[in-house]
Image: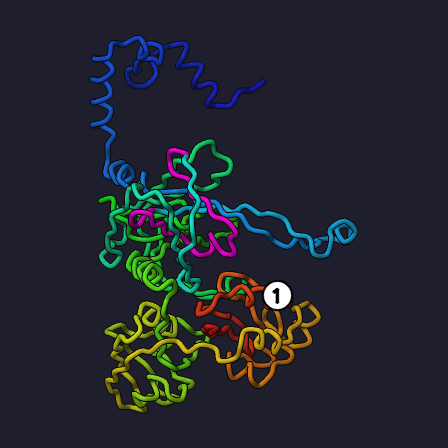
């Protein structure tokens, strides 16, 4: 039998005792050493191995927790065989896992998609202590949720700045990937570099949501890492790990984190108000995806009557070329500016009309609530599941989702949706069947801002809504 090369090398070294540098003391020899000898060896090892990454990890690790979520999910038959054995309305208890960290005493931050539809939430500390957690609030548009625990002495993190990150500088990702397979709750640590900043991740057929101004890193991020901190070499949290781009399901070095400034702002609003007030300008802009990289500015397609934009004199067909000093290459840049606005903030916009460019200042307002009651919206939408036959008949790009084949005028006025739109996602929930639409809308709380992503005439679009 031919042994693997590494087996042969190990055997040769064991036989000659002359391979490589002088050997370290064996485990038995270390165990029999005096306390003074062991302390001396330990001090030498610590001095030689303690790097900036080790120090950063030791500062943050005590603040990192595992977030364990329980919820019920309807079980759908996946085959003809299942139809005979899976009751039509059967539900099963599903356990979900993610990561969080202590932003303040008793306050835990995590991703919204980690706690989405949670019936119970348990936070596990690094020492194994389990604590029940209360959901203070969540914001699906930024993918941030805030939890509260009664234990106030969990060490809070130190926050840094994402605005001065250097491309190529070291960062550390802490989290609890596959925590249900591990025997303890101590966080897993991975290291990498800042690959890019200000990343806008565009929608595609597999991912209809958009992520704005993200930090990109090649530090390994895997299932369960969501909600964990991204930390610089000084031990400061600069972002919240949120998602990866992957074809395998595991890390391929394309991880993305939410900038910490946005996280703190959203958390503060949730703690103070229980929800996030979404700034509203009152315009719709063109979002053609085929040439999104080469667009020079953002074209205004409509202006809501009585909106802040209308009061400032903005009109359809105007081109927005700059906002708050940021160049607008395409609609994603405009969305980035809007996402980080507070209500009543003033936005300075350079507008191009024909050959003239003017500076316009707009004061943002609260996002209007949907005037139609939630039940009216649900009843006013008649949708069907997109199948291969429906896709071919209606010439739909999406191969999944819920097609609106009938909608009342009241609901169209309230939501902006029209007949022929294909609903692809509501917040973080991917819509695969018509039945999911009502369920997702029914789960929305009062005044909670949510986003519906849909396809219209072959192009991705979305609308932001809030029920009264």
Quadrant in the rendering for residue 364: bottom left
Residue at the front extreme of this rendering: 150
Depth check: give the residue in front, 124 or 452. Answer: 124
- Split into 4 quadrants, where in the image is the N terminus? top right
Q: Magenta includes 121?
A: yes
Residue 251 lies, in percent from the top left, at 45, 46
Residue 187 lies, in percent from the top left, at 38, 38
Q: Tell me the residue at 53%/20% (across/down).
A: 3
The colour style of the image is rainbow
Q: Magenta includes 332?
A: no
Q: How many labels does the image show?
A: 1
The answer, for residue 77, to whether it is visible in the render is yes
Quadrant in the rendering for residue 431: bottom right
Depth check: give the residue in front, 119 or 150. Answer: 150
- Classify 10 Å Cα crowding around label 1: few (below 14), some (14-19), many (20 and above): many
The answer, for residue 224, to whether it is visible in the render is no
- When the figure is inspected, residue 219 is found, relative to residue 202, above or below; the finding is above
Range drawn in magenta: 102-128
Drawn side of residue 458 relative to residue 240, left or right: right
Drawn side of residue 270 relative to residue 166, left or right: right
Q: Mark 1 points at which residue?
A: 400
Q: Tell me the residue at 54%/73% (across/down).
A: 374
Is label 1 in a helix, a strand or a loop?
loop
Depth check: give the residue in front, 368 or 22. Answer: 368
Residue 270 lies, in percent from the top left, at 36, 61
Residue 149 lies, in percent from the top left, at 38, 47
- When the figure is inspected, residue 225 is found, relative to residue 351, above or below; the finding is above
Q: Tell me the residue at 53%/61% (across/down).
A: 429
């Amino acid at each position: 039998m031919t042994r693997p090369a590494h087996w042969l090398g190990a055997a040769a070294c064991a036989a000659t005792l002359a391979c490589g540098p002088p050997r370290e003391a064996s485990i038995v020899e270390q165990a029999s050493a005096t306390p003074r000898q062991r302390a001396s060896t330990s001090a030498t090892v610590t001095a030689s191995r303690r790097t900036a990454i080790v120090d950063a990890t030791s500062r943050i690790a005590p603040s990192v927790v595992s977030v364990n979520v329980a919820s019920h999910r309807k079980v759908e038959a996946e085959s003809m065989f299942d139809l005979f054995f899976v009751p039509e309305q059967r539900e099963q208890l599903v356990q979900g896992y993610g990561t969080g960290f202590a932003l303040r005493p008793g306050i835990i931050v995590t991703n919204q998609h980690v706690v989405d539809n949670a019936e119970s939430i348990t936070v596990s500390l690094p020492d194994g202590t389990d604590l029940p957690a209360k959901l203070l609030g969540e914001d699906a548009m930024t993918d941030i949720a805030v939890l509260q625990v009664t234990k106030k002495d969990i060490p809070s993190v130190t926050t840094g700045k994402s605005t001065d990150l250097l491309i190529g500088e070291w960062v550390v990702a802490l989290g609890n990937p596959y925590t249900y397979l591990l025997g303890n709750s101590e966080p897993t640590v991975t290291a990498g570099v800042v690959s890019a900043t200000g990343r806008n991740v565009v929608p595609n057929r597999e991912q209809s949501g958009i992520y704005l101004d993200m930090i990109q890193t090649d530090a390994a991020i895997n299932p369960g890492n969501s909600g964990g901190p991204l930390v610089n070499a000084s031990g400061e949290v600069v972002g919240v790990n949120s998602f990866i781009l992957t074809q395998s399901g595991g890390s391929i070095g394309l991880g993305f984190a939410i900038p910490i400034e946005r996280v703190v702002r959203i958390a503060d609003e949730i703690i103070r108000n229980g929800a996030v007030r979404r700034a509203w300008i009152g315009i719709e802009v063109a979002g053609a995806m085929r040439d999104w990289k080469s667009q020079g500015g953002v074209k205004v397609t409509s202006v809501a009557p009585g909106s802040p934009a209308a009061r400032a004199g903005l009109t359809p067909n105007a081109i927005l070329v700059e906002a708050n000093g940021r160049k607008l290459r395409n609609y994603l840049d405009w969305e980035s500016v809007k996402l980080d606005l507070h209500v009543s903030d003033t936005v300075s916009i350079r507008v191009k009309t024909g050959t003239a460019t003017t500076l316009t200042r707009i004061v943002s307002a609260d996002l209007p609530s949907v005037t139609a009651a939630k039940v009216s919206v649900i009843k006013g939408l008649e949708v069907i599941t997109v199948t291969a036959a429906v896709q071919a008949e209606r010439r739909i790009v999406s191969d999944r989702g819920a097609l609106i084949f009938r909608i009342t005028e009241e609901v169209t006025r309230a939501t902006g949706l029209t007949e022929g739109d294909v609903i692809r996602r509501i917040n973080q929930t991917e819509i695969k069947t018509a039945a999911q639409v009502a369920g997702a809308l029914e789960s929305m709380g009062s005044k909670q801002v949510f986003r519906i992503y849909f396809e219209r005439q072959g192009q991705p679009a979305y609308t932001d809504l809030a029920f009264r």
